[in-house]
Image (spheres, rainbow, N blue to C red):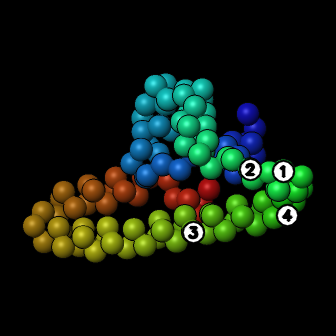
Amino acid sequence: MSTKEANSFSNLILLCLAHHAVVDRLASDRYTADLLRSWKEEREAPLSWTPPERILEPEPSDGLREAAERHLQDLLSESYESTNCRIDDALTEFEKLNAEAADALRALFRSFPNPSNE
């Protein structure tokens, strides 16, 4: 699969940050492409019903699909940044109790992929 295909909207499966790291890096051998596809199909199946009156409507144009992908990326990036701010605030408070542990947690959180850069 090319990088473009791997990063395409149709290949998207939303996971929380912690599970994204597990699935992609820490235990990727346990989470095969077939397993992930089956998860995606299970979750999206209830959403895939098309009312009869819309069956003959054309598929969205590539421009519309790209706009939807950009909008989703913006939403994910905004959520990521908001979460980072809350984590930084919590670590600043935690630092008062244990500076070394707070630094270790900061380093761990910085190791997670940033969707703004992907």
Mark-to-mark CA distance, 3 and 2:
26 Å
Nearer-N-terminus badge (4/2): 2
At horizontal 42% and vertical 39% (from top left) the residue drawn is 22
Mark 2 vs 1: CB contact within 8 A: yes
Pointer 1: what residue? 55
Could you tell me if residue 98 is visible in this image? yes
Residues packed near mark 2 inside 10 Å, few (<14), some (14 to 19) or many (20 plus)? few
Nearer-N-terminus badge (2/1): 2
Instruction: Say which of marks 4 and 1 sits in front.
Output: 1
Pointer 4: what residue? 63
Nearer-N-terminus badge (3/2): 2
Mark-to-mark CA distance, 4 and 1:
21 Å
Residues packed near mark 1 inside 10 Å, few (<14), some (14 to 19) or many (20 plus)? few
At horizontal 80% and vertical 51% (from top left) the residue drawn is 52
Pointer 2: what residue? 50
Left or right of 53, for residue 27:
left
Pointer 3: what residue? 75
Nearer-N-terminus badge (3/1): 1
On the image, the x and y values in percent for residue 87 come to: 32, 67
Residues packed near mark 3 inside 10 Å, few (<14), some (14 to 19) or many (20 plus)? few
